[in-house]
């Protein structure tokens, strides 16, 4: 059993999600969806949470905007953003042109049949932080009754990140 399968088995049984694997080209394509260098830098981050309502990005969270906690983790809910649905965005969305349709062009598996689509980019390289990231999304969907009417995609990006690690060594 691979690392991703082991990771997924530890998630709550009532958490419906579609697992996807991101390759280096898809990772580059996602980064290039940014309208400027700052957006591209944000989209290049390894851990991202994106909530779309229909085609519109309504909530966006990335690892570098989250403060660290004790025990090498991140506080995804540091301003109680996930205490509402959809969560209050951490990343200012003004000027962002990222849409669900653009993400579907990178990941054709994304259906977008339901009102909300949630994309969670995670990696085994940051296992503990990824686990808390996904747990934050799960708790938010469960608390507000959206476990069954939001499409969730857990997008593993170990492949492009392992390439980046190799390039820097």
Image (cartoon, rainbow, N blue to C red):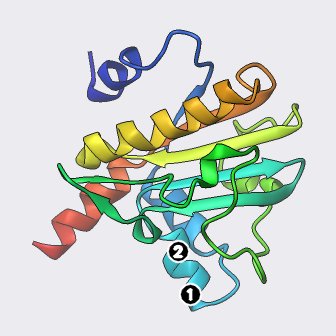
- Residue that appears at 70% across and 22% down: 147
Q: Position of residue 22 (x, y in %)?
A: 48, 47
Residue, far top: 13
| Element type where label 2 sits in the image | helix
- Residue that appears at 62% across and 47% down: 82
Per the rendering, the mark at residue 42 is: 2
In this orientation, which residue lies closer to the viewer: 8 or 132? 132
Residue, far bottom: 37
| Element type where label 1 sits in the image | helix
Residue 163, above or below 143 = below
- Rate crowding at label 1 as few (under 14), some (14 to 19) or many (20 or more) other CA atoms within 10 Å: few
Q: On the rendered structure, is 122 left or right of 112?
A: left
Q: How many marks?
A: 2
- Residue that appears at 89% across and 37% down: 115
- Specify the quadrant of the image occupied by residue 149: top right
The answer to whether the residues at label 2 and label 1 have Cβ atoms under 8 Å apart is: yes
- Residue that appears at 30% across and 62% down: 68
**Quadrant into which the C terminus falls:** bottom left
Residue 165, above or below 85 = below
**Quadrant into which the N terminus falls:** top left
Q: Position of residue 123 (x, y in %)?
A: 35, 46
- Rate crowding at label 2 as few (under 14), some (14 to 19) or many (20 or more) other CA atoms within 10 Å: many
Per the rendering, the mark at residue 38 is: 1
Residue 147, above or below 24 = above
């Amino acid at each position: 059993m691979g690392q991703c399968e082991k990771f997924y088995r530890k998630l709550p049984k009532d958490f419906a999600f579609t697992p996807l694997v991101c390759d280096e080209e898809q990772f580059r394509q996602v980064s290039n969806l940014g309208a400027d260098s700052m957006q591209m830098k944000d989209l290049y981050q390894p851990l991202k949470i994106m909530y779309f309502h229909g085609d519109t990005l309504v909530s966006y969270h990335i690892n570098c905007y989250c403060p660290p906690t004790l025990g090498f983790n991140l506080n995804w809910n540091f301003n109680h953003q996930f205490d509402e649905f959809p969560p209050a965005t951490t990343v200012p969305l003004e000027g962002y042109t990222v849409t669900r349709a653009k993400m579907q062009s990178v990941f054709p598996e994304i259906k977008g049949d339901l009102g909300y689509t949630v994309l969670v980019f995670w990696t085994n390289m940051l296992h503990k932080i990824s686990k808390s990231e996904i747990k934050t999304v799960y708790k938010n969907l469960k608390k507000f009754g959206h476990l069954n009417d939001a499409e969730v995609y857990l997008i593993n990006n170990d492949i492009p990140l392992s390439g980046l690690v190799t390039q820097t060594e």
